[in-house]
C-alpha cells in the first residue's frame, strides 16, 4: 500500500502543498517566535530570557518554510507549462513517464482535486496519485504506454489497492487503450478507465489556452486527417506513428507507419506541403 515516506520531513510535506500555504506557515512561525512566545513567557523568568533571544532570529525559523513555498511555486509553474504546451495525444505519448504522471496530476488539479503525488522514482505501492474532493478519495495509476494495450491484470491490481487503501474509487490513466477483458472487469465497479484520446480531451478542457496541433495535413483513403487524429493502421487496426523515410526515392518525406512494424507494414500516405503531391513510402 502507498504510504508517505517515514523519512519525509515537514518541509518535504510543505513543498508538496500549494505555495501559499508555505508562505502562510512562514508568517505564522515568525509571528509566533517574535511576538506570541515573548508575550506568553514575559512573567516567567526562566523562559523570558529564551523568548527575548528568539526575537532577533525569528526570521531564521520562518525561512525554511519560505524555501519550501518557493520550491512549491517553481513546481507549480513547471506543471502549468507542461500542461499548457501539449498539443494532443501524439505529444503526450512522447513525454517521459514521470512527466506523464505530473501531467495527469495537473489535469485533476485543475478540475478542483487536491493531489497527493505518490509515484516518482521511488516505490509507489501501485499508486501514482491520490485524489481528494468532496470528502471522497480516489487512487490513480498512470501508464504511458505507446504500443501496448493495458490488460486486465494491472486494472485488477489497482482495484485491490483501492480496497486496501479504503478509497472510494480508482482511476487508471493510459496514453493507449484497454483490452476488452480490462473493460469487462471495470464494468459495474468504481473503476474509471481513461484512455489516450479521452485524456487528450480532458487536457484540452482545462488548458489555459488550448493549443492547435502544429502539423501538415495527412491523407488517408483520399481524406485529410490531422496529425492529432493519429489514424489507425489500415491492415491491423493498431495506432500509427509518424515516421520519415530514410532511403529510396521518398527519402526525407513523412508518412504514418504502423506501430507494430516490422510485424505489420501498414502505411498511410502523407500529403506533400505546398505542392499537394503525395509521398508514398515503399519501405
Image (cartoon, helix red, strand yellow):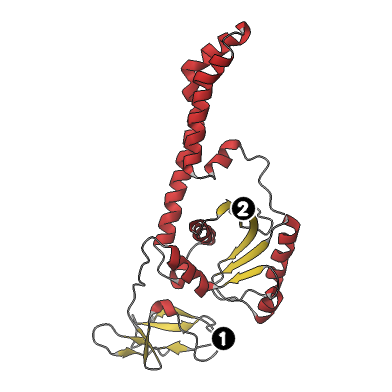
- Work out which residue is located at the far top of the displayed protein and give it: 45
Residue located 72% across and 55% down the image:
165
Q: Is residue 278 left or right of residue 118?
A: left
Q: Tell me if I can see residue 97 in this picture.
A: yes
Q: Is residue 62 left or right of residue 167?
A: left
Q: Secondary structure at mark 1?
A: loop
Residue 256 coordinates in the image, percent (x, y)? 43, 83
Residue located 59% across and 13% down the image:
41
Q: Tell me if I can see residue 94 in this picture.
A: no
Mark 1 closeness class: few <14, some 14–19, many ≥20 residues within 10 Å: few
Q: Nearer the viewer, residue 179 or 98?
A: 179
Residue 86 coordinates in the image, percent (x, y)? 41, 65
- Per the model, the C-alpha gap separating discs 2 and 1 is 37 Å
- Work out which residue is located at the far left of the displayed protein and give it: 275
Q: Which numbered dot is residue 131?
A: none
Residue located 62% across and 8% down the image:
44
In the picture of the structure, the residue carrying the numbered disc 2 is 118
Quadrant of res 178: bottom right
Placement of 19 over or under 197, stated as above or below:
above
Q: Secondary structure at mark 2?
A: loop
In the picture of the structure, the residue carrying the numbered disc 1 is 263
Looking at marks 2 and 1 on the same chain, the residue that comes earlier in the sequence is marked by 2
Q: Is residue 110 left or right of residue 125?
A: left
Q: What is the quadrant of the N terminus in the image?
A: bottom right
Residue 143 coordinates in the image, percent (x, y)? 59, 66
Residue located 24% across and 83% down the image:
274
Amino acid at each position: 500500500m502507498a504510504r508517505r515516506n517515514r523519512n519525509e520531513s515537514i518541509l518535504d510535506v510543505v513543498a508538496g502543498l500549494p505555495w501559499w500555504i508555505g508562505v502562510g506557515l512562514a508568517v505564522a512561525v515568525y509571528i509566533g517566535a517574535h511576538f506570541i512566545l515573548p508575550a506568553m513567557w514575559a512573567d516567567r523568568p526562566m523562559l523570558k530570557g529564551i523568548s527575548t533571544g528568539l526575537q532577533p532570529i525569528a526570521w531564521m525559523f520562518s525561512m525554511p518554510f519560505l524555501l519550501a513555498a518557493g520550491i512549491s511555486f517553481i513546481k507549480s509553474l513547471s506543471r502549468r507549462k507542461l500542461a499548457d504546451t501539449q498539443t494532443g495525444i501524439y505529444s503526450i505519448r512522447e513525454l517521459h513517464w514521470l512527466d506523464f504522471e505530473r501531467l495527469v496530476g495537473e489535469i485533476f488539479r485543475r478540475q478542483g482535486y487536491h493531489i497527493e503525488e505518490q509515484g516518482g522514482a521511488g516505490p509507489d505501492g501501485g499508486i501514482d496519485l491520490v485524489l481528494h474532493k468532496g470528502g471522497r478519495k480516489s487512487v490513480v495509476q498512470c501508464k504511458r504506454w505507446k504500443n501496448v494495450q493495458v490488460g486486465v491484470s494491472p486494472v485488477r491490481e489497482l482495484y485491490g489497492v483501492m480496497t486496501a487503501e479504503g478509497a472510494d474509487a480508482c482511476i487508471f490513466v493510459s496514453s493507449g487503450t484497454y483490452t476488452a477483458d480490462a473493460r469487462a472487469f471495470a464494468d459495474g465497479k468504481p473503476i474509471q478507465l481513461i484512455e489516450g484520446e479521452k485524456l487528450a480531451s480532458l487536457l484540452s478542457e482545462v488548458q489555459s489556452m488550448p493549443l492547435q496541433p502544429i502539423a501538415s495535413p495527412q491523407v488517408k483513403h483520399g481524406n485529410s486527417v490531422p496529425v492529432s487524429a493519429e489514424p489507425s493502421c489500415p491492415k491491423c487496426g493498431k495506432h500509427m506513428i509518424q515516421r520519415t523515410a530514410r532511403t529510396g526515392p521518398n527519402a526525407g518525406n513523412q508518412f504514418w507507419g504502423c506501430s507494430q512494424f516490422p510485424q505489420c507494414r501498414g502505411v498511410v500516405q502523407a500529403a506533400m506541403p505546398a505542392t499537394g503531391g503525395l509521398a508514398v513510402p515503399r519501405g
